Structure formats: C-alpha cells, structure tokens
Image (tube, rainbow, N blue to C red):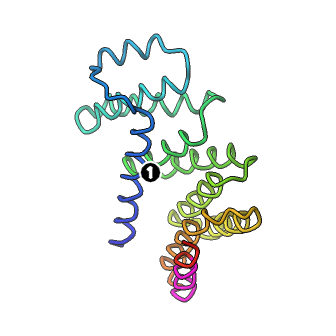
C-alpha cells in the first residue's frame, strides 16, 4: 500500500511538474483577475485550458469553489473540443486521479487520450494505454486493465518501441502484485529491469 501510494504520488509530482513546466515555461506574475481577463479574450482551446489550469493551481486548497469551477471548465472544454492534444488530455487525467481521486473522470480522459494517440502507435500511445490499463485494474476492472496492459506490451514489441517496455512491464508487475500473483509480479519486475 505504501509503495502504491508512493508511486502514485511520485508519478503525480512528475506529471504535474512536467506538465506545468511545459505549459507555463515562462514565469508568470499574473493575478487571478488578469488571468480571467485573458481567458475571456482567448480563442484557442488549448490556451484556454492552460489559463484555466493556472487559475485552478492558484485556487488549489485556497478556494474550493473556484478550484472546482476551473477544473470543471477544463473538463467541459475537453469534451467539446477536437483540438486538444492527447498529451494535455492525459495529463489532466492525472490531475483528476491525483488531486481528486476521481477515477471515473480520469479513466474517461485516459481513454480519450489513448484513442487520440492510437493511430500513431508511438511511445505516448503505449504509455497512455499502459496507464489506462493500470488504472482500470486498480479500480476493480482487473481483466480489462490486464488486457490493455498486455496489448500495450504486444504493440510495443511489434513496433519495436523498446523504450516503452519498462514502464508497461512495471505497471504489469504492480497489477499482478496487487492481485496476489507474486510469481508474475516478479517476472514483470525483472523484465522491466532487463528492458531498462
């Protein structure tokens, strides 16, 4: 349990720092009022999401109503836009999973990100499908989660995307460990180390 929480926290910190660093690479001195004015003028959906996430981060743990409002706006914009990148959708899924423990919304976002990236069959697609599988398994949908993870591994092997394999193998090991199948967990932990 401690390892699972530590993994979840570590992944969350890495995702958020990477996402926020990528999203807000220029240090901002904007106030919530100035951000809200920029948001009103903004026409590009991905830029609106960045502003809404910046407002969400500003209000996080300070004003729950406004925090919820901006995260809801992000979710609504994703639902109604075809121009948001799979990377952004995937990372917002992590916000829902880690900040809110809202697995229903997180799974919906992971599924959407995976579907958007599917045609590319690239590293991101493998990782999105692996995390979708892992999250499905840890929310009680073991068979579907395992199927997603094994499919991600098969795709990575068939497409020679060896750099994606350690992450997928590690998540498979966690799924088997959590299910009590320590033999398979050990096998996938070893595969992960060998593939690294």
The answer to whether 162 is drawn above or below residue 16 in the figure is below
Give the camera-side residue of 10 and 68: 10
Q: Quadrant of residue 149?
A: bottom right
Q: What predominant SS class does the magenta segment belong to?
A: helix
Along the horizontal axis of the image, is 47 left or right of 62? Answer: right
Along the horizontal axis of the image, is 57 left or right of 179? Answer: left
Q: Quadrant of residue 164?
A: bottom right
* Relative image position of residue 159 (x, y in whole percent): 75, 62
Dot 1: element: helix
Which residues fall within the magenta stretch? 182-191
The answer to whether 57 is drawn above or below residue 120 in the figure is above
Residue at the farthest left position? 62
Q: Per the image, is 190 magenta?
A: yes
* Relative image position of residue 165 (x, y in whole percent): 61, 67
* Relative image position of residue 5 (x, y in whole percent): 35, 65
Image quadrant occupied by the C terminus: bottom right
Q: Mark 1 highlights which residue?
A: 97
Q: Residue at x 47, y 28 (%)?
A: 73
* Relative image position of residue 114 (x, y in whole percent): 65, 49
Q: Per the image, is 168 magenta?
A: no
Q: Residue at x 44, y 45 (%)?
A: 96
Disc 1 crowd rating (10 Å Cα; few below 14, some 14-19, many 20+) is some
Along the horizontal axis of the image, is 191 left or right of 40? Answer: right
Image quadrant occupied by the N terminus: bottom left
Give the camera-side residue of 10 and 104: 10
């Amino acid at each position: 349990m401690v390892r699972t929480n530590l993994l979840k926290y570590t992944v969350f910190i890495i995702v958020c720092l990477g996402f926020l660093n990528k999203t807000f690479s220029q240090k901002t001195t904007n106030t919530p009022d100035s951000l809200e004015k920029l948001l009103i003028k903004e026409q590009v959906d991905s830029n609106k999401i960045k502003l809404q996430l910046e407002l969400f981060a500003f209000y996080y743990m300070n004003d729950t109503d406004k925090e919820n409002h901006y995260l809801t706006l992000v979710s609504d914009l994703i639902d109604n836009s075809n121009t948001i990148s799979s990377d952004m959708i995937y990372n917002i899924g992590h916000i829902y999973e880690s900040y809110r423990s809202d697995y229903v919304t997180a799974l919906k976002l992971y599924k959407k990100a995976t579907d958007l990236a599917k045609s590319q069959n690239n590293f991101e697609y493998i990782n999105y499908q692996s995390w979708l599988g892992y999250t499905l398994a840890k929310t009680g949908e073991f068979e579907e989660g395992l199927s997603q993870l094994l499919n991600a591994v098969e795709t990575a092997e068939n497409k020679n995307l060896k750099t994606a394999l350690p992450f997928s193998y590690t998540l498979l090991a966690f799924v088997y460990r959590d299910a009590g199948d320590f033999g398979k967990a050990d096998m996938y932990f070893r595969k992960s180390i060998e593939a690294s």
